[in-house]
Image (tube, rainbow, N blue to C red):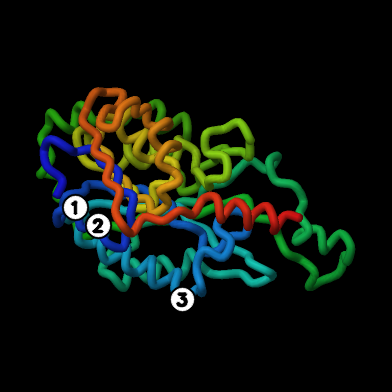
């Protein structure tokens, strides 16, 4: 179990079982689950769409257990097109979390800059056939789904903690956090970036969500940690960070992103525990080989 001396923790293992966490020990969840078998990120990761949804349901059950009453889960998700078939991931995940007892609080639309999206073979069908029924749009957005576990007790937070966690109103207004459409540049494909071959989201997304839905000193969990973006931002904002990641091949990437120089040290000198479970897998190399073959 997470003790007072090890509030920052990485577990390499399947987040369908978060046995390391006590009941109601987490204040906020910010994450992005794998987009089923997305051809450029997770080709053939799951045997079927039903198995993907079963995994999401099992993680939702664990999140209901470990999340404190009144607190928030934010999931960055999107529908996915695979071999001409569109999978309604946003709708299905929404239903799963509602069925598990969470309240559907909001949906924020994350819009990416149009300049980074080229006309694809999908949308280009209309250029070759400029007639009705040939229209298939390219996607510039993803959804940030916000769920809540019951009602939050605003009186449970001391005035001192409220003050040190206060949101910068000028930043809030300038960057239009108050809208349910956020214009944020995505992490662009770049062979030199740390997350090469990893579907990472920009730091601005967890930055906003952590500021808006947690207080300093609280614990932020990412059950699909990837390269560790959520954990990095959480620590920089004075929160404790816990991440689960099934792919052990991401260990060195995570350590580099978080500035872990030694096994149990992090940049702010808090203890950081790394646990490697038997159910961790080696996925990154195999996935990238499949991505490369798919592009040929």
Q: Secondary structure at mark 1?
A: loop
Q: Residue 21's mark?
A: 1
Residue at 42%, 71% in the rendered image: 53
Q: Position of residue 123 (x, y in %)?
A: 76, 59
Of mark 1 and mark 3, the one earlier in the sequence is 1
Residue 103 visible (yes or no) = no
Q: Residue at x 36, y 42 (%)?
A: 209
- Write the residue at 15% across / 45% down: 2
Compared with 295, 259 (above or below) is: above
For mark 2, give the secondary structure: loop
- Quarter-of-image position of residue 255: top left
Evaluate if marks 2 and 1 touch, with contact meaning CB atoms under 8 Å apart.
Answer: yes
Residue 221: % across, % down? 29, 47
Q: Position of residue 286 (x, y in %)?
A: 56, 55
Left or right position of 180 against 273: right
Q: Is residue 140 left or right of residue 217?
A: right
Tag 2 residue: 18
Q: Quadrant of the C terminus?
A: bottom right
Q: CA distance from mark 2 to mark 1?
A: 6 Å
Q: Residue at x 38, y 40 (%)?
A: 230
Would you place residue 196 above or below residue 143 in this image?
A: above
In the rendered image, which quarter is residue 166 located in? Answer: top left
Crowding around mark 3 (Cα neighbors within 10 Å: few <14, some 14 to 19, many 20+) is: few
Q: Which mark is residue 44?
A: none
* Circle 3 residue: 50
Q: Is residue 57 left or right of residue 161?
A: right
Residue sitting nearer the eye, 205 or 14: 14
């Amino acid at each position: 179990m997470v003790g007072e001396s090890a509030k920052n923790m990485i577990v390499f293992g399947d987040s369908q079982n978060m046995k390391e966490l006590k009941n109601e020990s987490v204040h906020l969840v910010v994450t992005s689950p794998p987009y089923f078998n997305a051809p450029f990120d997770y080709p053939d990761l799951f045997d079927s769409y039903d198995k993907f949804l079963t995994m999401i349901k099992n993680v939702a059950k664990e999140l209901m257990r470990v999340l404190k009453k009144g607190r928030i889960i934010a999931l960055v998700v999107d529908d996915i097109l695979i071999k001409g078939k569109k999978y309604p991931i946003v709708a299905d995940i929404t239903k799963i979390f509602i069925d598990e007892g969470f309240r559907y609080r909001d949906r924020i639309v994350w819009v990416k800059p149009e300049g980074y999206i080229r006309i694809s073979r999908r949308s280009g069908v209309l250029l070759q056939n400029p007639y009705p029924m040939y229209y298939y749009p390219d996607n510039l957005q993803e959804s940030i789904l916000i769920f809540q576990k019951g009602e939050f007790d605003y009186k449970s937070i001391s005035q001192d903690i409220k003050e040190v966690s206060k949101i910068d109103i000028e930043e809030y207004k300038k960057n239009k956090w108050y809208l349910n459409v956020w214009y944020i540049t995505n992490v662009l494909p770049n062979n030199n970036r740390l997350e090469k071959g990893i579907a990472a989201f920009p730091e601005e997304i967890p930055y906003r969500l952590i500021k808006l839905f947690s207080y300093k000193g609280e614990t932020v969990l990412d059950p699909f940690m990837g390269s560790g973006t959520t954990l990095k931002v959480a620590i920089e904002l004075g929160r404790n960070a816990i991440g689960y990641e099934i792919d052990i091949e991401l260990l060195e990437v995570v350590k580099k992103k978080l500035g872990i120089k030694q096994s149990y040290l992090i940049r702010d000198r808090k203890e950081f525990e790394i646990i490697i479970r038997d159910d961790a897998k080696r996925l990154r190399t195999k996935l990238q080989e499949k991505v490369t073959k798919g592009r040929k």
